[in-house]
Image (cartoon, rainbow, N blue to C red):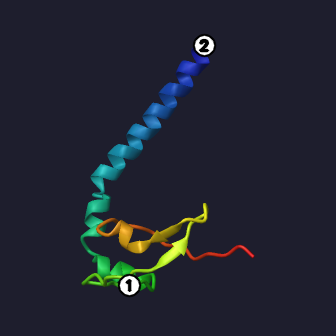
Amino acid sequence: MQSNKKYILIFALFFAAQFIYGCKNGNSTESVNTKTSVADLMASLSIQHIAKPVIAPDFELPSVNGEKVSLGKYQGKVILLSFWATW
């Protein structure tokens, strides 16, 4: 039981030292994020930034149950379309 307390104390001191050292050096994600814009990050990942949304044309596809599902049914909601095939 005594050795468990010793290990807990060592871990607590280690993490406290890391926290204090990080605060002293000013290492925070806030200072890093303000230097890089979203557009720059998207460009670095080869993702096209669309400033004005484009309305997708309405279409129907069969669902897993065989029912027809229309894109217009989900108007105003955020959806993710995945046209992935496993064959």
- Sort mark 1 into few (<14), some (14-19) or many (20+) by Cα contacts within 10 Å: few
Instruction: Please tell me which residue is depicted at 28% across the width and 52% down the height of the picture.
Output: 24
Considering depth in this image, is 30 or 23 the residue closer to the camera? 30
Task: Give SS at disc 2.
Answer: loop
Figure check: 62 above or below 54: above
Which residue was labeled with disc 1?
Answer: 57
Considering depth in this image, is 21 or 49 the residue closer to the camera? 49
Please give left or right for residue 12 compared with residue 39 in the image. right
Q: Quadrant of residue 19?
A: top left
Which residue was labeled with disc 2?
Answer: 1
Q: Residue furthest front?
A: 67
Q: Residue furthest right?
A: 87
Q: Please provide percent x and percent y for residue 54.
A: 31, 84
Q: Please provide percent x and percent y for residue 46.
A: 45, 86
- Sort mark 2 into few (<14), some (14-19) or many (20+) by Cα contacts within 10 Å: few
Q: Which mark is residue 11?
A: none
User: Disc 2 residue type?
Assistant: Met
Q: Quadrant of residue 25?
A: bottom left
Return the disc, 1 or 2, that comes first in the chain's sequence: 2
CA distance separating discs 1 and 2:
67 Å
Instruction: Please tell me which residue is depicted at 35% across the width and 49% down the height of the picture.
Output: 21
Instruction: Please tell me which residue is depicted at 42% across the width and 83% down the height of the picture.
Output: 47
Q: Please provide percent x and percent y for residue 75.
A: 32, 70
Figure check: 56 above or below 21: below
Please give left or right for residue 75 compared with residue 79 in the image. left
